Amino acid sequence: MAATSKALTRREVVVQGASLALAAAFASIFSQSRAADLAVVDAAYAGSMSSMMEGPIKSTAARYLRLDIRGRAQGSDALANLIAAGSIRPDVFIPITPGPMLTVLRAGKSKIATPIARTEVVIVYSPKSRFAAQFAAASRGQEPWWNVLRRPGMRFGRTDPIADPQGRNIIFTMMLAARLYSVPNLVEKTLGPMVNQRQIFSEPTLLARLQAGQLDACSAYKIQPGPFELPYIGLPKQVNLSSDRVRQENPGLELTIAGKTYDPEPLIFYAAAMNDSRNPKGAAEFVEWLNGSEAQSIFRRYQYDPPDGAPALAA
């Protein structure tokens, strides 16, 4: 009797396992079928947006727009040059600062770009850093943040100023801080040469290196440290490039790198559908949605600030 009961239990386990396997197979087929129903939109976007675009924006667009957003994250300048040259052909382009978008618009790749969000420069630091206590004190206003960055042995990270606006923006921030705090050598003491290979890393890997303890601190936008659960220091408005009038407020402030001169630009994200999009309907729907209340509420939740009436860009 006990043997029969034991045998029945084994059969029940086998049947239950088979049922679970069959259910999993049907779920997989259903999931693949649902994915196949989504219209693909290829988006090229600023590397600083990776967590947002690959997370809540992608999942929400799939659920409500029936769009599969497939992304390419890179420095905005590099992406703009690739698009203008015809080397890549995304459906939608989302850079930060007006410059890269104007490159694409002037190349005839799109007609108009709308502002969807803005951000500001911050200094992110590693809790594993030997300077973590000093950075924490600076975040509370108990020590000058710029003074901590000048400590001997500081391992600071930033992106390439030739290929990425963020790489230039931290230089502008330090230039403005040097003026604000009357520290003439601040740029040289914190950043060294404008293109300093010891400090420069690709934008998608910068915070991962910081999180792993390979760096003490790095430049970032306010939107970036949250997904990595990293602490950061907010900077004064006079230096964080959050103002729409940053150029007008700082006449004569410019930066020349690799023979090209740049002015400071507001940290606004723009979105544009490309003229040669493979999915023009999906691209237009996605850009329109990014300007709508649903996407805007997602941006607010993840520390993106509203564009606050920033004008659209046209060729």
Image (tube, grey):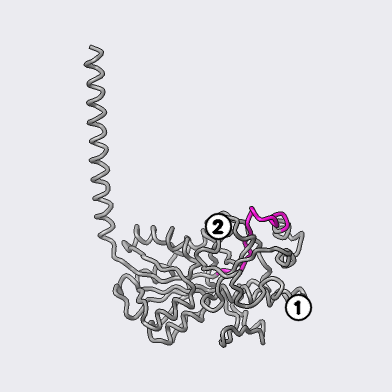
Query: The N terminus is located in which quarter?
Result: top left
Query: The C terminus is located in which quarter?
Result: bottom left
Residue position marked by numbered label 1 in the rendering: 184
Determine which quarter of the picture holds residue 61.
Answer: bottom left
Q: Is residue 30 left or right of residue 148?
A: left
Residue position marked by numbered label 2 in the rendering: 226
The percent coordinates of residue 273 (x first, y second) are 37, 76
Residue drawn 68% across the image and 77% down it: 175
Looking at the image, which is closer to me, 212 or 184? 212
State the extent of the magenta-drawn residues as a range: 119-134
Q: CA distance from mark 2 to mark 1?
A: 32 Å
Looking at the image, is mark 2 or mark 1 earlier in the sequence? 1
Residue drawn 32% across the image and 80% down it: 276
Three-letter code, disc 2 = Gly
Classify 10 Å Cα crowding around label 1: few (below 14), some (14-19), many (20 and above): few
Three-letter code, disc 1 = Pro
Residue drawn 54% across the image and 56% down it: 228
Looking at the image, which is closer to me, 272 or 132? 132
Tell me the element at label 1.
loop
Q: Is residue 6 left or right of residue 60?
A: left
